[in-house]
């Protein structure tokens, strides 16, 4: 909007130091009258361009303002407040961002850089050493040992270098995790192969109770030791 108003040579009417148009008098010269006429026309044109650039809701809100300068100042105040809110939101978002284990570390570093670029667009510059320190501080707890190692290193590293280190470390961790998983699977397979497929049977043998059955009598249904006929036969044999 400012560029268009400047190209039309009417942006000057929004200058806060511009003196207001004096009321016309009978003593005004033709030059003064021409200047007053031009100012009035430029004021009307500037006000119209500003209102035409607004949405319907904002148009209804600001159309009651009598001058282009009043509309411009109100809009500047509104969007300046929103801009300040955006800056605070982005700053809070940057500090609240934490890395997690279930996402690739480098992908999270790139997401953090998106916030840095948004802050840069709002004219908030973060020094590179600050960004490097923030990346290290935001690493998850599983990277605690690596974080200590980096912090104890006296050499200064750039943002590009820390990303390179993180990529190497992450690839190494993924490789170790894959190898450990393979070893566990192999150990489980060997254990299964050593086990018999059929369940072990109890090798202990139980003696079945001895049952004597009377086979030589006409009245079955009792044990041989209780048979009176057998006892009588035994006695006769002893005689």
Image (spheres, grey):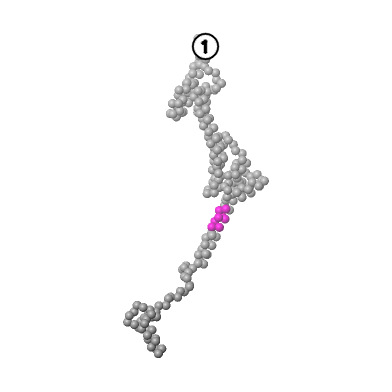
Q: Does dot 1 land on a helix, a strand or a loop? A: loop
Quick check: 178 left or right of 156?
left
Residue 33 in magenta stretch: no
Residue 99 found in image quarter: top right
For the image, the number of numbered tags is 1
Q: Position of residue 218 (x, y in %)?
A: 32, 82
229 and 57: which is toward the camera: 229
Residue lying furthest bottom: 239
> Residue at point 46% right, 25% down?
62
Q: Position of residue 58 (x, y in %)?
A: 45, 28
> Residue at point 54% right, 57% down?
181
Residue lying furthest top: 26
Residue 159 found in image quarter: top right
231 and 123: which is toward the camera: 231
**Which of the image's four quarters has the C terminus?**
bottom left
| Magenta region, main secondary structure | helix
Residue 175 in magenta stretch: yes
Against 102, residue 233 (above or below) is below
Q: Position of residue 61 (x, y in %)?
A: 45, 26
180 and 201: which is toward the camera: 201
Residue 85 appears in view: yes
> Residue at point 36% right, 78% down?
222
Quick check: 53 left or right of 157?
left
Residue 9 appears in view: no
Q: Which residues are magenta?
A: 173-181
Q: Position of residue 28 (x, y in %)?
A: 52, 11
Quick check: 142 left or right of 59?
right
Q: Residues within 10 Å of mark 1 (few under 14, many from 20)?
A: few
Q: Which residue is mark 1?
A: 28
Against 177, residue 208 (above or below) is below
Against 141, residue 68 (above or below) is above
């Amino acid at each position: 909007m400012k560029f268009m108003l400047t190209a039309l040579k009417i942006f000057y009417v929004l200058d806060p130091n511009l003196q207001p148009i004096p009321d016309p008098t009978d003593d005004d010269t033709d030059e003064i009258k021409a200047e007053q006429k031009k100012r009035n026309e430029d004021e009307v044109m500037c006000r119209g361009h500003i209102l035409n650039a607004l949405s319907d809701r904002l148009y209804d809100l600001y159309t009651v303002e009598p001058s282009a300068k009043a509309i411009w100042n109100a809009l500047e105040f509104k969007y300046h407040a929103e801009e300040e809110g955006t800056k605070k939101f982005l700053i809070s978002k940057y500090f609240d961002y934490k890395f997690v284990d279930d996402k690739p570390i480098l992908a999270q570093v790139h997401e953090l850089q998106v916030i840095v670029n948004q802050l840069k667009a709002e004219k908030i510059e973060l020094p590179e050493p600050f960004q490097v320190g923030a990346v290290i501080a935001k690493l998850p707890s599983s990277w605690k040992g690596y974080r200590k190692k980096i912090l104890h290193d006296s050499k200064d590293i750039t943002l590009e270098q820390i990303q390179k280190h993180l990529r190497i470390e992450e690839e190494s961790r993924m490789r170790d995790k894959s190898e450990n998983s393979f070893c566990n699977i192999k150990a489980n397979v060997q254990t299964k192969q050593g086990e018999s497929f059929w369940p072990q049977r109890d090798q202990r043998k139980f003696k079945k109770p001895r049952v004597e059955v009377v086979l030589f009598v006409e009245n079955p249904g009792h044990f041989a030791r209780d048979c009176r006929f057998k006892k009588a036969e035994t006695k006769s044999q002893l005689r």
